[in-house]
Amino acid sequence: MNNIPLSKSTYIRGLQCEKSLYLYKHFYHLKDPIDPQLQAIFDQGHEVGILAQKLFPNGVDASPESYYNMRESVIKTKSFIDNGESVIYEATFEFDGVIAALDILVKDNEGWKAYEVKSSTSVSETYLNDAAIQYYTIINSGVELMDISIVYINNQYVKNGGIDVHELFTITSVYDEVQQLLPNIPNKIEQFKNVIGNNSVPKIDIGEHCSKPYGCDFRGHCWKHVPEYSVFDISNLGTNKKFDLYNNGIVTFNQIDLENNPLNQNQFLQVVSELNQSSYIDYENISHFLRDLKYPLYFLDFETIGTAIPIYDGSRPYQQLPFQYSLHIQHIKDGDLTHYEYLAKPTTNEDPRIDFVKKLVNDCGDSGDIIVYNIGFEKGKLNDLMALYPQFSSEISNIIDRLKDLMIPFKNKWYYTPAMKGSYSIKSVLPALVPELSYQDLEIKEGGTASNLFLQIVKGEFNGDIDKTKKELLEYCKMDTYAMVKILEVLYKS
């Protein structure tokens, strides 16, 4: 495959950044490693693609034995077409140095139609460019396409029994949009071939293209001149303003003109705090926040899973379903802690949410504030549960009414230290305020990993020690609520 100048994916890469295209072709070893969460997204996309084949069943598969031998797929595809096959999966075509694989090629009574499957919930501009290069390659290979469509997830679909693929997927023709893009494709192909053929890396500086439409996997290489903590870490500063600073030679905080800058009050506070290595505490607002708390206090945290293909009845694609919680209870200030927790049985046969609700309602009692970190998340999940289980409406509503958000003092910069580095996430606040505690001491260090591991167990795809991983899941979630207890202690002492 290496002697083929462009594939569909490298064409899209070139549209985003020609430097990325060049590095991919000549310095592949400089790519950032794929983190487990990104790999999980890729795996989910593959799973969605396989399921979408049921929209057009009984097809033949043109996939090659190895990804690095895509010409095998080209040969297979031609053979299938010549032999009268009407549904071909992974049909692959080559023209003018471009090779493009299509998820599903179908011939009906109107002629050949192309279908590209995406695991997203809408059609993006990138998908149109993706379809356009496919269409261009296919028609110039001698196959007359009557239509080309994007197949994507209908996020309003609610599972009820087996997956209904005709309800789960939405099919939208992009034929007209593709026609508008076709005239530019030959020039782009020639342009990208020239880029690949150059003897030097294109001189393209970092910019918003590094993350749009996708996060570039050469970021670690291209951004190595940017310090670990820089103007790009200024909290809630728009990306365009960050690059305005960068393009004016301002990368570190000490280069910022404090008399003439685009920063708001909180951003200015972050910069000054870093320059002076000084903390800021708004005693009045913190005191008011603390006085408003009503004991007993319940420190609550959820973990959730969300999949493109719903697992449980009564759930939608990508709906975040709670499968675990941790709850620390403190009846009086500085009092002893009681801990409760819940971890669902990892099975596709038993929806975890009903047991989750029953135990949560019992553990949360009926009075006292419930402390969470980022109230919108837990409130949203509780509202979903209330809609699903109306018999628990009054109890869940009671829990929602008692929620208090511990993130507020840090989001509003009422309490800020340089160690937070502009972030008010609990992963940044905890080590800044309580350095003796750290998520780095845990096997599971963040929620994405917890979700992915639980999903692997549910789907029967986990190869490790399940009992050990369950304990690690409980320890991670327990740290989230214990962290809130310790953070609140620091606020009381401030």
Image (cartoon, helix red, strand yellow):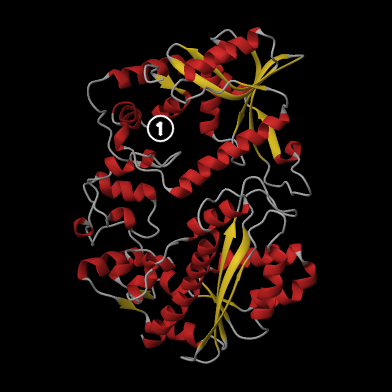
User: 385 or 338: nearer the eye?
Assistant: 338
- Check the image and report above or below for 100 versus 409: above
- Check the image and report above or below for 307 versus 400: above
Q: Amino acid at mark 1?
A: Gln
The number of discs equals: 1
The residue where tag 1 is placed is 16
Residue 15 in the figure: left or right of residue 293: left
Find residue 259 and report its image quarter.
Answer: bottom left
User: 193 or 247: nearer the eye?
Assistant: 193
Pick the quarter of the image with the C terminus. Answer: bottom left
Q: Is residue 412 visible?
A: no
Pick the quarter of the image with the N terminus. Answer: top left
Residue 216: image location, x then y, percent = 38, 39
Residue 71: image location, x then y, percent = 48, 16
Q: Is residue 202 visible?
A: yes
Packing grade of label 1 (10 A; few <14, some 14-19, many >=20) is: many
Give the residue at x 40% y 58%: 236
What element does badge 1 sit on? helix
Residue 490 in the figure: left or right of residue 459: left
Give the residue at x 39% y 27%: 14
Residue 254 in the figure: left or right of residue 30: left
Residue 24: image location, x then y, percent = 34, 30
Residue 276: image location, x then y, percent = 21, 70
Give the residue at x 35% y 76%: 433
- Check the image and report above or below for 347 versus 117: below
User: 401 or 362: nearer the eye?
Assistant: 362
- Check the image and report above or below for 274 versus 242: below
User: 348 or 35: nearer the eye?
Assistant: 348
